[in-house]
Image (cartoon, helix red, strand yellow):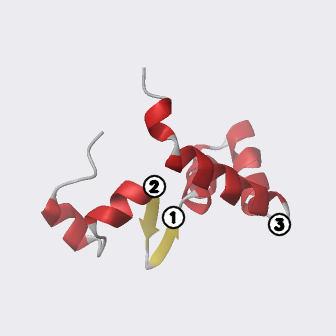
Amino acid sequence: MSAGSPEDLAALELSLEDAKRSVWWIEDGVRLAGHAAIGKALRQVGGLWSFVGVLISTPPISWLAALVYRWVAANRHRFKS
C-alpha cells in the first residue's frame, strides 16, 4: 500500500510518517486522522454505514474506537495475506 508521493503529501501538509501511521480525511480545512477519519468516511457512504460512522465518532464509543484503531494500525502487518 502506498502512502502517496512526496508531492501529494507535501500538498496535504503530511509527513510520510503521518501517512504511514494513520488514514486521513482532509476537507475544507478539517483534518481527521485514525478512527475519526474512518467515521467521517463511513458517514459519507450513507445507509447503515453512516450510522456506524456516527457511532464510532461519538463518545464513549469513540474512545473505544480510538483504542481499536491504534491496535489495528500497530498490528496491520499481521493482517496481510
Amino acid type at image mark 3 = Pro
Write down the residue under mark 1: 33
Residue drawn at x 82%, y 66% as measured from the top left: 59
* Residue 72 in picture, x, y percent from top left: 58, 44
Write down the residue under mark 2: 23
Q: Which image quarter is the N terminus in?
A: top left
Q: In this view, does 43 lie above or below 33?
A: above
Q: In this view, does 42 lie above or below 12?
A: above
Q: How far apart are marks 2 and 3 (CA)?
A: 20 Å
Quadrant of the image occupied by residue 6: bottom left
Residue drawn at x 43%, y 75% as measured from the top left: 28
* Residue 76 in picture, x, y percent from top left: 48, 39
Q: In this view, does 21 lie above or below 73?
A: below
- Which of these two is toward me, 67 or 57? 67
Q: Which mark is residue 59?
A: 3
Q: How far apart are marks 1 and 3 (CA)?
A: 16 Å
Check disc 3: other Cα within 10 Å, few if <14, some if 14-19, many if 20+: few
